[in-house]
Amino acid sequence: ETGVTQSPTHLIKTRGQQVTLRCSSQSGHNTVSWYQQALGQGPQFIFQYYREEENGRGNFPPRFSGLQFPNYSSELNVNALELDDSALYLCASSLLAGSHEQYFGPGTRLTVT
Amino acid sequence: QQQVKQSPQSLIVQKGGISIINCAYENTAFDYFPWYQQFPGKGPALLIAIRPDVSEKKEGRFTISFNKSAKQFSLHIMDSQPGDSATYFCAAKADTGGFKTIFGAGTRLFVKA
């Protein structure tokens, strides 16, 4: 059984650009949540996907969007990057949408200059 | 009402000592309270969790104490070891619409050898 993997590890983008981050869920998990973790802060919930549908969203603008694929891998897309988008982006997979236990990947460190 | 307040921000403990981290919440709909451990360059990992129907849960050297009336819970790390040096996050989640985990801001623990 493999854990949650994310790619790329690090990424540097310029303000105004677009970025796509990828996540591969733990085997057998059909739910993925994305979090933004600013330096020195706790993770903040962006949204969750369950069976390819958005299942809930935190206080993030629409330029943060996502996709989940039939194999339950997932993407986080951020358009019109702002300097404040610089953070560690974490995905976490769960066995079911209502499961409390979630397993985090190592994250993608995004730097916006 | 969605916040989880965590203290202290940082903590230095001697090897063999007890590390104590405290959290408080407002939303009485929360009914699952996990603690996560995060090492540099890694995603958070679930350490231990508690439901509000019990006042204490112990797993090895880690104990959660829960005070429902005060809406507070704490993590105690007994016999703290240098390998415990990490950032610890308390969190809270509600069963209903339970896709959103709210994290505290984190406590950076350093255990001196």
Image (cartoon, coloured by chain):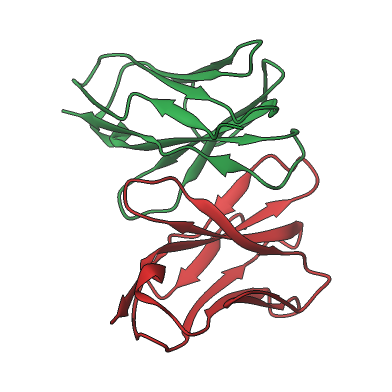
A44 sits left or right of A49 in the view: left
- In the image, is residue B21 above or below residue A112? below
State whether residue A59 is above or below residue A64.
below
Residue B65 appears at what percent x and percent y?
66, 79
Residue found farthest to the left? A113
Identified at 34% across, 45% down, the residue is: A38
Residue at point 75% right, 63% down? B28
Q: Quadrant of the N terminus of chain A?
A: top right
Q: Which chain is red?
A: B
Return the residue found at the far front. A1
The colour with which the image depicts chain A is green
Q: Position of residue B42 (x, y in %)?
A: 39, 46
Farthest residue, direction top: A70
Nearer to the camera, A87 or B61: B61
Q: Quadrant of residue A69?
A: top right
Which image quadrant: the C terminus of chain A?
A: top left
